[in-house]
Amino acid sequence: MAGVVARQDLRTPAVFVLETLAVAACYYAGGRLGLLRELTVAGAVVSPVWPPTGVAVAGLLILGLRCWAGIVLGSLLVLMHLTSLQPASAGVLVGSTAAPVAAYLLLRGVGFRTDLSRLRDCLALVFLGAFGAMLISSSTGAALLVATGDLPGRSFWGVWLAWWVGDAMGVLLLAPVLLMLRRLRFPPHWSRWKEAVGLTVIAGCLVPPATRSPASLLFSVYPLLIWAALRFQLPGSMLCALYASVMATVAATDRIGPFAHMTEVQVMVNLQAFNGAMALTSLLLSAVITEQHRTRRSVERACQELVEVLEHLAAGESAAGRPPDADGGRRPDAR
């Protein structure tokens, strides 16, 4: 027994180290992906979608607060890739860690469920986990840039807004996908795999031209999101939204298609409006449809139980009205 306890004690630090390294690696990988596409706002270079925030929030929701060390390590690696470490880097690390931790605490405080099957969970992720908590990282980062002289004071609000929306988009677009992948089982038993293949092919053929055409065809993506949400709920709609967001971000940073003749601020505003609308549509519509399906199943189950009760009562009444046995007993109405 003592040997079992000793092995368990040794296993706990090892698991913590592995989880920390895994979160840090995913955070750093997300940061490198986010740095592939950048926009210049008010003289500062920002990422329109910052995937590490989604990685951090999803990691906290899956592993708990113990993975904060992985977030710090991953953020440190991203900073070291961008620039040399300075005293102000400590403030960036604090803001990058405090924002996801605040999102986790806020979501836990309202009883958040990671399956995102309720409308209230999706609303909590949007307004508490993304728009609310990411105010911490954007405010800290922009304030440090101004305090160190790297950013003029008049440019604070433009950089702050771009930073905040980029962090929020990372949570809205990536965190649901990571939470969904956690619950995915292989091999998936899809009853509509042909329809899934058809949706994938149509999305692959429609989204790239829609995001690169100068005719402003971005709105044509929304029927795909609705189709994916109606038939495949959260997995289909969020994967479709993520793909469309990636393609739109590539078009925006390359200044092609509908973003060709826009100013820097207009590109940021239009891109983030498109990404935010897609994320909200996918999350909220999927949650409503999932709740309706759950309500229908509950009603069907209640009806089945009611039918079974009625059949049981009918069988009991039939038994009470049967003729007497062959032992000479009388019927209840015999005189």
Image: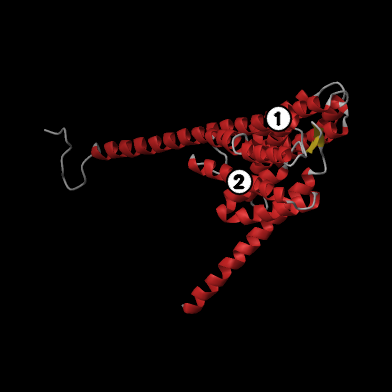
Left or right: 296 in relation to 151? left
Counting other residues with Cα less than 10 Å from the Cα at mark 1, is it few (<14), some (14-19), or many (20 or more)?
some
Q: Residue at x 88, y 23 (%)?
A: 261
> What is the three-letter code of the residue carrying label 1?
Trp
Q: Nearer the viewer, mark 1 or mark 2?
A: 1
SS state under label 1? helix
Residue nearer the viewer, 113 or 52: 52
Dot 1 corresponds to which residue? Answer: 157
Q: Earlier in the sequence, mark 1 or mark 2?
A: 2
Give percent across and percent down for residue 69.
63, 56
State which quarter of the image contains the C terminus.
top left
Residue 194 placement (x, y as % from top left): 73, 39
What residue sits 82% from the left and 22% below the top?
216
Quick check: 116 left or right of 319? right
Amino acid found under the numbered disc labelled 2: Ala
* Mark identifier at residue 98: 2
The Cα–Cα distance between marks 1 and 2, rounded to whole angstroms, is 21 Å
Note whether residue 189 is visible: no
